[in-house]
Every structure is written in structure tokens, then in C-alpha cells.
Amino acid sequence: MVSSSHAFKQTLSRAFCLSTAVVCLGLSNSAWALFSDDEARKAILDLRKSLATTQLELQSQIDKLKAENAQLRGKVEVLEKQGEDISSSQKTYYQDLDTRLGNFEPRTETIEGVSGIVEPGEKKAYEDALKTFQSGSLKKASEGFSAFVVKYPKSPYLPLALYWGGNSKYATKDYVGAISQLQSLIKKYPDHPRVPAAMVTLGNSQLESGNKAAAKKTFSEIIAKYPDTEAAKDAKQLNAAIK
């Protein structure tokens, strides 16, 4: 970069000298008397040629400087991008590390309003059972939720395990098992947001098992306690259909 600056200064110096010569030539008409017409024309042509050469050299130096600046800007942008990538990689690394540590250490979590200590492997056990339910393997899902309820009786995931376990048992026509798990959910967590829907499945299980009186009572409770919910709409239709 130093040699480019030195050459640039030399070029400017030559241009200045040539410009001075033009001014000097223009100051005195008598100076041209020393030259013949041919010599004067030749001197002017030489001067123009020299100026043109100087302009080209100046432009070349300017273009070179621009190119060097562009290269420097490109290098700076690359370094900035590398810095952003490193920062992003570090963030991802620490998030992944935190997740992995969470798999080996108990931690406090709040699940749909229920707080508690989540033991290592607890969340995965619940999620595996839920994925099984969502895939349509209802009997296997029912077994997974039942195993979860037994293994993690104080889990913040317990209300959901009881809810989905009851639904999976109802879907496999295990109405006694469905009633047991859904009643357990309603008794232990009466204010849980899943209770209205759980009561609908409970009433259906009671109805399918032949206990129409219990089903009508359950549907009536839904209508009275949760009048503005989808569960209440379903309960009204089901209650009206009981003969």
C-alpha cells in the first residue's frame, strides 16, 4: 500500500509540472516566436500526449486504489461474517449443552399450569408415549401412559399422561381403565384446563360401559360447570341422545 501511495504522489507531481508548463506557454505570445509553426504544433502535440499519458496514469492509480479498498472491504465483511458464525455456533453449542445436561439433572418445569420437578428421562417417556398415540398405535400408547403414571406419580406431566392415557384406553374400548384414569385426573387436578374435555370422554366411557345414569350425571355437570365451552356443546348433544 505504501509503494502505491508513493507512485500516486509522483504522478500528481508530473501532472503539476506539465500544467505549469502550459500556463507558462500561455503567458507570453512572444515565446512562440522562438519556434517555427511545425515546432510549435509538435510541442503542443507532445504536451497533449504527455497530459493524456498523465491522466491515464492517474486514472490507473485511482482504479488500483479503488480495487484495493474493495478488497479490504471484502476482507472486513468476511471477518465480520466469521465472527457472526462463531457467535451463532457458540450459542447453539451452549443451548445443546444445556439440553443434554437437562437430560441428566432434575429440573423444575411448569406444564399447563402444573409445576414440579422433572426427573431425568421423564419428559422423554411422556413424549414417546404421546408420539405413539399420535401415530395411531393406541394400545401401545395406553401402556406407555400407564407406565408413566406409575413411575412418575408427582410429575407435572401427570395430568396430561392421565388425560391421554384415558383417551387411548377409551379408543381401545378399555372403558374401565379409561374411567379410572380420567376420574383420577378430575379428582387430583379439578382446575386443570383438560378437565372439561376429559369429562366428555369419561361420560362416553360410562355410556359405552352401560352406565347411562352415570353418563347423564357427568354430561349434566359439564353443562353446569363449563357452559361456554365446546365440551358443554358436546355434552348437550350426548345427553339428549341418551334414551
Image (cartoon, grey):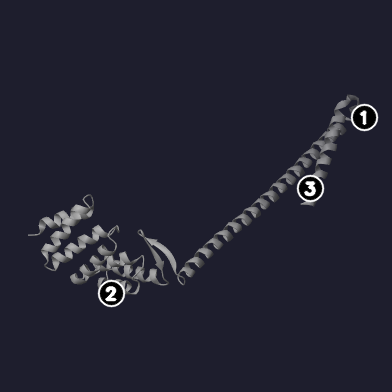
Kindly report which numbered mark, 3 or 1, lies closer to the viewer in this rendering: 3
- The relative height of residue 76 versus residue 207 in the rendered view (above or below) is above
**Residue 88 lies in quadrant:** bottom right
Above or below residue 25? Residue 81 is below
**Mark toward the start of the polypeptide (3 vs 1):** 3
User: Residue pushed farthest top?
Assistant: 29
Residue 168 occupies quadrant: bottom left
Q: Which amino acid does label 2 sit on?
A: Glu
- Asked whether disc 3 touches disc 2, contact meaning CB atoms under 8 Å apart, the reply is no
Q: Mark 3: which secondary structure?
A: helix
Q: Crowding near pointer 1: few (<14 within 10 Å), some, many (20+)?
A: few
Asked if residue 173 shows in the view, the reply is no
Q: Determine the CA span between mark 3 and mark 1.
A: 39 Å
Query: Residue 218 appears at what percent x and percent y?
Result: 17, 60
> Of marks 1 and 2, which one's residue comes earlier in the chain?
1
User: Could you tell whether 153 is left or right of 39 in the image?
Assistant: left
In 3D space, how far apart are the residues under numbered discs 3 and 2 (Cα atoms)?
A: 80 Å
Please state which amino acid type lies under the numbered disc 3: Ser
Circle 3 is placed at which residue position? 5
From the viewer's perspective, is the residue at label 3 or at label 2 nearer? 2
Q: Is residue 108 left or right of residue 62?
A: left
Query: If you read the primary sequence from the N terminus, does the residue marked by circle 3 or circle 2 appear first?
Result: 3
Q: Which mark is residue 123?
A: none
Secondary structure beneath disc 1? Answer: helix
Asked if marks 1 and 2 touch (Cβ < 8 Å), the reply is: no
Q: Which of 153 and 10 is in front in this view?
A: 153
From this view, report whether residue 7 is shown above or below residue 150: above
- Residue 141 in percent (x, y) is at 29, 71
Q: What's the mark number on residue 143?
A: 2
Residue under label 1 = 34
Amino acid carrying mark 1 in the image: Leu
